[in-house]
Image (cartoon, rainbow, N blue to C red):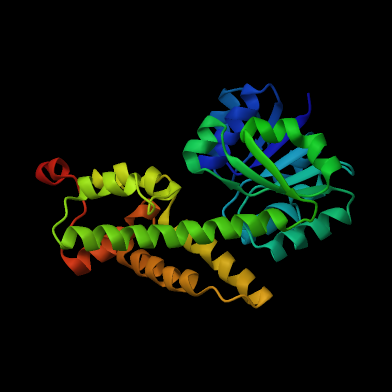
Amino acid sequence: MKKVGIIGLGSMGKSMAKNLLKAGYELTVFDIRPEPIQEMVGLGAFGASNLKEVGERSEIVFVMVLNFAQVESSTVASGGVLSGMKPGSTLIVTSTIAPSEIKQIAKAASALGVEVLDAPVSGGSVGAANGTLVIMVGGEERVFQKCKDAILAVGSNAVKVGDEIGIGSVVKAANQLMVTVHLVAMAEALVLGTKAGADPEIMANIIRKSAGSSWMFENKIDALLNGDFSTRGALDIQIKDIDICLKTGRELNVPLYTSAASREVFLWANGKGYGREDASAIIKVFEEVAGVEVRKKAAVASA
């Protein structure tokens, strides 16, 4: 059984770590916070004291941190995990970063003989907890096969999307573009219907069975109608993801009109203080302007 490391023990990374332990891997973990490290140690992982130690103890290292700055500082910076990784070991970057950015990481790793897989994920904290994440893997087939069992331990829906480093991040960017636009469209539609007098619950049940439905609608609508905006995917993280889409569009000279407009709505909601709530809280800015709340009647009555 391969020795595996994971850097980043937030809501996603900690669940991934737990699933690696369940699968029987000898696991080394690291986070800038001591609390999640101690929790994982209690479950049987080894808590590394620094990033280099994760690399020294691991044949495969997963990186699940927030953004490119954190990926860069935890991998290629002085004292990063690459400083401890042996030639022939594999770095799997599951963070959502731009295609051009993962290529920078891969170039630095390659110079040290370390192989890289570009493997962003989708499915949120629920998918991470259940081990059902969709993982969009870019990289050599040989490297993918070598790490496939460990990847499947954290995401049963792992798919090889191409041989080129960066192609996984391209697919993730396209997915996040649609997530962002769907959330804004959902908010506008529900507020419009409610303002015009439609019962939000009846309207939602009709949309579920109609052409306007989507995965995002299905997975957000029940909590939204109950006024539950507890974080399953934070609103402010969605801003980071749509910025990656727009950055990629600029690099490729591809216009992304609806993405750009949706980003401004998310910035508006973030400015209103909803950044750490679930991304579905985007609806609140439309509700405030329209003077209505899209809730079940029972939820409104009990509020």
| 69 relative to 147, above or below | below
Residue 124 in percent (x, y) is at 50, 43
Q: Closest to the observer: 15 or 41?
A: 15
Viewer-side residue, 116 vs 108: 116
* Furthest residue in direction front, as rendered: 210
Q: Give the quadrant of the N terminus.
A: top right
> What number of labels is visible?
0
Answer with left or right where residue 38 lies relative to residue 299. right
Report the side of 71 relative to 280 (left or right): right
Q: Residue at x 59, y 42 (%)?
A: 134
Image position, residue 237 (x, y; %): 48, 57
Tell me the residue at 63%/49% (across/down): 120
Q: Nearer the viewer, residue 286 or 74?
A: 286
Decide if residue 235 is on the left or right side of residue 78. left
Residue 227 visible? The answer is no
- Residue 211 visible within the image: yes
Q: Is residue 190 above or below residue 208?
A: below
Question: Image quadrant of residue 87?
Answer: top right
Q: Residue at x 62, y 46 (%)?
A: 64
Q: Position of residue 123 (x, y in %)?
A: 52, 43
Q: Position of residue 279 (x, y in %)?
A: 39, 54
Q: Quadrant of the C terminus?
A: top left
Residue name at image x 76 percent, y 61 percent: 103
